[in-house]
Image (spheres, rainbow, N blue to C red):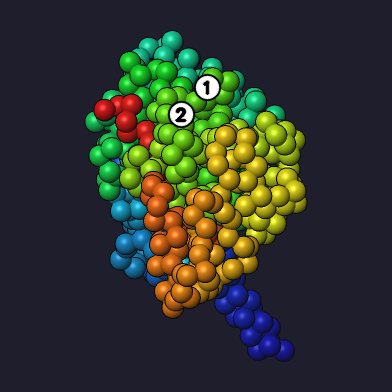
Amino acid sequence: MKRLTLLFVTVFALFALAAPAFAEDAITVTSNKFTNNFRKNLTFVLGAQSAAGKITNIALLIQLEGIASSGRQIPDFSPGAQVQATYEWNLERNYLPPGVSGQFWWLIEDDKGNQKQTEKQNFRVEDTSQQWKKLANSQVALYWYAGGDSFGKALFDRAVEAMQYLQQDTKVSVERQIQIFIYGNRNDFFKAIPMSSKEWTGGQAYTEYSIVVINVEPNSLEWGKDATVHELTHQIISQKIRGPLGDLSMPHWMDEGLAMYYETYPNPLDNQFAAPLKRAIQNDTLMTVRSMVGAFPTDSAAANLAYAQSYSLVDFIIRKYGRDKLAQLLQDFKTGGFYDDVFKKALGVDTDGLETEWRKDIGAKPRVIPTRGATTPTPFPTFSLSTDPFVAPTAAAKPSATPQVVAVQATAAPPAPTAAPSNPLRSVALCNSTGLIVLGVIATAWQIRRRRPHV
Ligand SMILES: [Zn+2]
């Protein structure tokens, strides 16, 4: 009996000894520090010790606001009873704009199987090289440092005003505050955006984080107001349409057209765009609407025409079909589907039908619309993206294995379109399957367009 008791006591004692080793507090955190060194890096440093064994595994989890999943990072450290682990997020390689916030926490494990998860901590990426001033409401925050109080207030007031009619028209209520950082000096601006940015960059939009970074010199206030509204529009449309993977399923011309429309509203279109549009109508060199579904041309004259036409199309949709239809159209884009079907459902016309109506409205000649559904090249000369209805395909044109040549022959007489129309089907595919890339292109095109007023 005594022996049995002793055994029990021994077993109990072993359990008592073993128990703390599996308890949460076997591992203690001695320090936990985040340091923001924008634009160089973000560092996360953890000090921890284990009373039971060697700490062998540490992971840092980072959850950025606006990104669906958290990232797991492995820090540098030497395993031991007492450790210091460091993780450096290299911003020069993996850029994050100022204003991004998130949470981080650590998972620590020792060789005895003890684990510990630290509390989630907030952090924010900040450009501390400037003395930022801030004006904000729940939907938009504007940060600036140059140009005095009235400069920032003028930009903020314009943003708030635009926000009101944008939300009304698009039926979007902004859920995430949009942060706008105004850099008043070109050098400062380039120290804050990705190192790989082109020298003509005027602004960058990070729709996944609802952040905009723009270079507005204090003497370019009017341009700055327009640029701010232009970017706000992209952000609001993105909040409305963006899918869970960050893809923006709408024609590029519509996204840019909306941004142009609200940037301009209620004023007439700036001559930088109005003039090429007028010329293209007169010369019958408008780009086809289908060719503007994907990325815009990089050539600045052709890009200006693409922006101008995009504006004109959105203006036409609003005038002819009304703002409610526009809101419905945006809603339908969010639901998804082929662009033609979305247009047909909301407006009663597909892309070609819309183009026909629009051309009529702006006084352009009608164009020959290729049959919808002709997805593969055919030898018929009628399959052409010709913009000239007067050069009728002739019976003499021999069916050829290279139909493009036939199409070119049929359109040889009129002036060449400003930009070669791309295959509409390929553009749709590009937009649908690589939304993130297209978003990048959107930003780039905007920068090109924005270059001119500065130069
Ligand atoms: Zn834009």
**In the shown orientation, is residue 302 left or right of residue 105?**
left
In this rendering, the answer to whether 225 lies above or below 85 is: above
Earlier-in-chain disc, 2 versus 1: 1
Of 291 and 2, nearer the camera is 291
Q: Tell me the quadrant of the picture where the C terminus can be found.
A: top left
Of 223 and 48, nearer the camera is 223
In this rendering, the answer to whether 239 lies above or below 87 is: above
> What's the residue at 52%, 51% (across, down)?
390
> What's the residue at 56%, 24% (across, down)?
265
Of 201 and 276, nearer the camera is 276
Number of marks drawn: 2
Tag 2–tag 1 contact (CB < 8 Å): yes
Q: Is mark 2 within 8 Å of ligand 1?
A: no
> What's the residue at 66%, 82% (across, down)?
8
Indicate which disc residue 244 carries. Answer: none
Residue kind at label 1, given as amino acid type: Pro
What is the spatial separation of the Cα atoms under label 2 and label 1, in whole angstroms? 9 Å
Q: Nearer the viewer, mark 2 or mark 1?
A: 2
Asked whether the viewer can see residue 149, the reply is yes
For mark 1, what is the residue?
268
Percent x, y for residue 296? 43, 48
Indicate which disc residue 274 carries. Answer: 2
Percent x, y for residue 451? 32, 33
